[in-house]
Every structure is written in structure tokens, then in C-alpha cells.
Image (spheres, grey):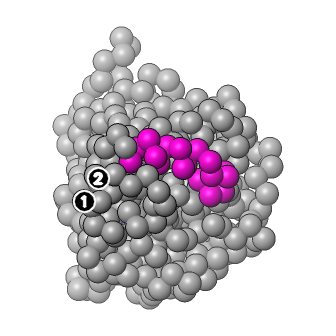
Amino acid sequence: MSDASSATPATSTRPPGVSSEVGRLRTVMLHRPGPELQRLTPRNNDQLLFDGIPWVSRAQEEHDAFADALRSRDVEVLYLTELLTETLASEEARARAVAGVTQSLRLGDTLRDHLRGWLGELSPAELTDALTAGLRNDEVRGGFGLVTSLLHSDDFLIDPLPNLLFTRDSSVWIRDKVAVTSLAMPARDRETQLTELIYTLHPRFSGIETIHGWHREHVEGGDVLLLSAGVVAVGVGERTTPAGVERLARQLLADGGAHTVLAVPIAQERATMHLDTVCTMVDVDKIVMYPNVADHLAAHTVTATEDGQLQVSDSAPFLVAAARAMGIDALHQIDTGLDPVTAEREQWDDGNNTLAVAPRVAVAYERNVETNARLEEAGIEVIAISGSELGSGRGGPRCMSCPIARDEL
Ligand SMILES: NC(=O)NCCC[C@H](N)C(=O)O
């Protein structure tokens, strides 16, 4: 469970809404790493999308320091598990959560019925733990039948969700609406069941419109960059699919969420799983970008015709297409000027994955010494945090944060 003593109470009335990457950050949703990380073993870490086995208590310390750095800049920090527990006070939320998590065809009828009964008796906080940390076969008490006898004792009946840490990916606010995303990797599929519950049933978000949704064409929040009000760049690669960006673009262009969407192909590789692994905005007209991709990153500009059809341009260099859509002379790339090997090492360690808390102020991992030095030379204040354990899931400060409210620029 999250550290309730240091959390800001979820009672602020600041209206949610985000229209850029760099407007002053007011409210953010994080997930403090918890028991779900204790489930990682050398046998399952690849499937669960971690590159190692994190030291959990150190990861929690690093995460608490990250949250404190944000609070010290007057950012309200909400925790996903606290919001979920509050949501699960509602009978409807509990029923939906239990039904969703027991859908798996792996269970069979006997075990499913047993689990439904068991989960239904848990308190909201216990149910949050089960939904996030999962459940092993040998943790089930009673309900023994054929399936539970044949599964291995350490098989999961409910998969743990270690990637909840990366709250960026399972929902993204675009103006005053929130897109509940549809995650591509099986290990993360269930995360958006939880964010959908929070946004549809937590009183804080009452009246908020959700778009996209669980089990639609794949879109992940790490691919979605709000370059400026009305201009949304969407990476298309290992996670977000062409069909995913098409559906999102259609929705945004139809309901005023954007006037222009840039569809940006990225290499379908783990190192570049999301657009925010290669570039993030650090000022209204500055972007820090992995130099090894800078020269060939390109974009299709997508707009809507008067009768609502999508209009797709030929591909153009990303920085050119972005500046044109944003109505500025140039989107300046922070020239990290690194030799290709250092650049590759720092990109792998999320050097380009910064979280702006205001224009020209960004949180970054301290280990990316060269990239951070270049950011500072370019006039960006770097709030350096340590991420030796947090980074083993391959995500940096932007990945670990879902902005809920930012000031308009
Ligand atoms: N926006 C991001 O780049 N998020 C990082 C996600 C890391 C996670 N282990 C994953 O593979 O999905």
C-alpha cells in the first residue's frame, strides 16, 4: 500500500485538465511501488516487462524522494492505490472489479466461483492489494478443485501488475477529458481496468468524460505528447498501433481535444517502446531528443475536413511538422551532442524521459550525467532524482507520472 502519511489528501478541488507537457504541474497521479514488485523472479521478469529484479525497499525510497521533489514544487501527489481503495467503497466498483479480474479462462468455473466469493469478502484496501499484487495458487485457501490441483503452486491466478509504477501509460488527460488507454502487452492489459474504475466511479472524477477505453485498438500514454494546446503527437511502434492512433485522432479531432494530431513512427524495439523514451518537452519550444533518432524522426500530420473525415499528409521531418502545427518558428531540439555510445546508454536509462513541472524545469534521473549537463546548458533547471532500482522497469520520471492538472500556458 502507498505511504498514506506522506500523501496529499485526495480532496483538492482543482479541476482536472492538461493541455501541454510543460504548463505548471498542479496534480499528478503516481503509484508507489509495492508488493506487486515482490512477485518478480528471474523466471518471470521478462514476461512482466522488467529487465531485472528490483530491491523493493530501495525502489520505494527512490519513489518517495521523487514524490517529495514534486511536492516541494507545490504539486499535489495522488496515489493510484489510494484512489482505487476509495473507489472500491462503492458496491458497483467492487462488483465490476471482481468480475473483471476473474474473467480469465485460466481459472475454470470452480476456481472462478471460489475466487469471486473470496474477493467479495475483502475490505476495499485488501481488494486493492489483490488486484495489484495478484494472487498465487498456493495463496488460495479452500475451493480446491481440478484446476488448482493441476496448476503449479506458484502459478498466478491473478497476475501481479508491477508496471502500475508507470502511471503514464494507463491513462492520459487531454484537455478536460481522460483517455483510458488500451495497453498492448498482456502483462499490462488489466491496468486499464483499474484506471477505468477510478475515473468512472471515484467521486473526485464525477462528471468527467472518458474517451478511448480498455480493449480498443492499442494506445499507450507514453506515446502521447501534448506538444501545445491542440497539437498532440502520438508515437506508433511497439505499443500504439496505426489503428490505435487512427481511433484516438478521430475522437480528438471530432470533440475539440486537438486540431492536429501528428502520427510519429518509432522503431518497434524495447529501447524505444514509447515516443517518450526518445523525446520529451522541457519548454514551450524545446524538446530533449535522443540524438541517434533525431535525424530521421518523421510525422504524418492528421487533421479533419469540414465533414469530419481524417486528412493525412505525407511524412515530413518531425521537428518541422511539429513547429508548423504548433504555429511557432521552430521546435528546438536540445542538442545533447553526445557520442553515440554515451547517447545510447543514457537513452536506455531514460535520459530523454523527463517530466516538466513548469516551463524550463524538469525532473530527470541523476545517472544521465551528460544529458542533464546539456539540459542545464540549454537553460533547463534539472531536478535530479535517483532511479537505480526504479529504472529496472525501463521507465523514467515521465513514465512514472500521470499529470491530472496543469496550468494553461
Ligand atoms: N512511458 C513509458 O515509456 N513507460 C515505461 C514502461 C515500462 C514498462 N516496463 C513496459 O515495458 O511497459
Residue 96 % position (x, y): 53, 36
Is the stretch drawn in magenta largely helix, strand or loop? helix
> Residue 138, relative to residue 110: is it above or below?
below
Quick check: can you spot residue 267? yes
Cβ at disc 2 under 8 Å from ligand 1: no
Residue at image coords 31%, 18%: 309
Tell me the amino acid under the disc marked 2: Val
Labelled disc at residue 150: 1
| Label 1, label 2: how far apart the Cα atoms are | 5 Å
Quadrant of the rendered image containing residue 326: top left
The span picked out in magenta is 111-127
Looking at the picture, tell me which residue is in the foreground, 124 or 194: 124
In what element is the residue under mark 1?
Answer: helix
Is residue 126 inside the magenta stretch? Answer: yes
Looking at the picture, tell me which residue is in the foreground, 193 or 102: 102
Residue at image coords 37%, 82%: 53
Q: Residues within 10 Å of mark 2 (few under 14, many from 20)?
A: some
Residue at image coords 55%, 55%: 402
Quick check: can you spot residue 385? no
- Residue 143 shown left or right of residue 408 in the figure: left
Residue 199 % position (x, y): 60, 39
Is residue 137 inside the magenta stretch? Answer: no
In what element is the residue under mark 2?
Answer: helix
Looking at the picture, tell me which residue is in the foreground, 129 or 265: 129
